[in-house]
Image (spheres, helix red, strand yellow):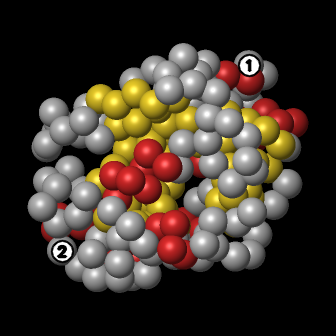
Amino acid sequence: MILGRSFYDRPTVEVARDLLGKVIVLGAVAGRIVETEAYVGMHDGAAHASRGLTARTRVLFGPPGHAYVYFIYGMYHCLNLVAEAEGSPGCVLIRALEPVRGIGIMRRRRGVERLEALASGPGKLTVAMGIDLRWNGADVTEGRFTVRDDGMPLGGSIAAGPRIGIRKAVDWPLRFWVQGNRFVSRG
């Protein structure tokens, strides 16, 4: 079942937690979300939205259920899913996936064999899934690029802690992961 717009039209922290265990599907590849980070809008100094509405952040201020993809460090793309009502720029960074379909394709794209290394970080998972700036603004509630609930149990309890790789609001416990999952990033 594809997650509808109402799933994303809620507080960002709830969406970040509830995305754990859901499956991102893009064409022939798919991965189960095992780690997320919440970015809670304009008052969150670590969020892109804290700088206000710009050409880059326009997607964040739009309707929920869209992909916000950006390029960092001159080499990596990151995937976020827009949460909250239109005009309230919350988003969830997808930090790690457990590969579930198209593993051969992911291995070719990443150039690695070890299953745990395919999508265990935000830059790794976008390469493995084939996500780049072409997907910025994509509606993930329909089409080739979707997020689904396949009814599988989470497989562990949810842990929370500080976000990784930021300089502002570093102590906010807005990183969520499936405890004990071998596909979670290593920080």
Q: Is residue 161 left or right of residue 14?
A: left
Measured as percent of width and height from the top left, residue 169 is found at 14, 42
Q: Is residue 146 above or below residue 174?
A: below
Measured as percent of width and height from the top left, residue 168 is found at 13, 43
Q: Residue at x 75, y 63 (%)?
A: 1
Measured as percent of width and height from the top left, residue 181 is found at 58, 22
Along the line of sight, which residue is nearer the eye, 159 or 96?
159
Measured as percent of width and height from the top left, residue 119 is found at 62, 35
Q: Residue at x 73, y 47 (%)?
A: 151
Q: Secondary structure at mark 1?
A: loop
Residue 56 appears in which quarter of the rendering?
A: bottom left
Asked whether the residues under the numbered discs 2 and 1 touch, taking CB atoms below 8 Å apart as contact, a structural biologist would say: no
Number of other residues with Cα within 10 Å of mark 2, as a class: few under 14, some 14 to 19, many 20 or more: some
Disc 2 residue type?
Gly
Number of marks: 2
Q: Residue at x 69, y 54 (%)?
A: 149
Q: Is residue 99 above or below residue 62?
A: above
Q: Secondary structure at mark 2?
A: loop
Query: Which numbered disc, 2 or 1, marks the residue that appears first in the sequence?
Result: 2
Q: Is residue 23 above or below residue 89?
A: above
Q: Is residue 121 left or right of residue 16?
A: right
Disc 1 residue type?
Arg
Residue 124 visible in the current orientation: no
Q: Is residue 181 left or right of residue 53?
A: right
Number of other residues with Cα within 10 Å of mark 1, as a class: few under 14, some 14 to 19, many 20 or more: few
Q: Which residue is mark 1?
A: 114
Q: Which residue is mark 2?
A: 52
Indicate the quadrant containing the C terminus: top left, top right, bottom left or bottom right: top left
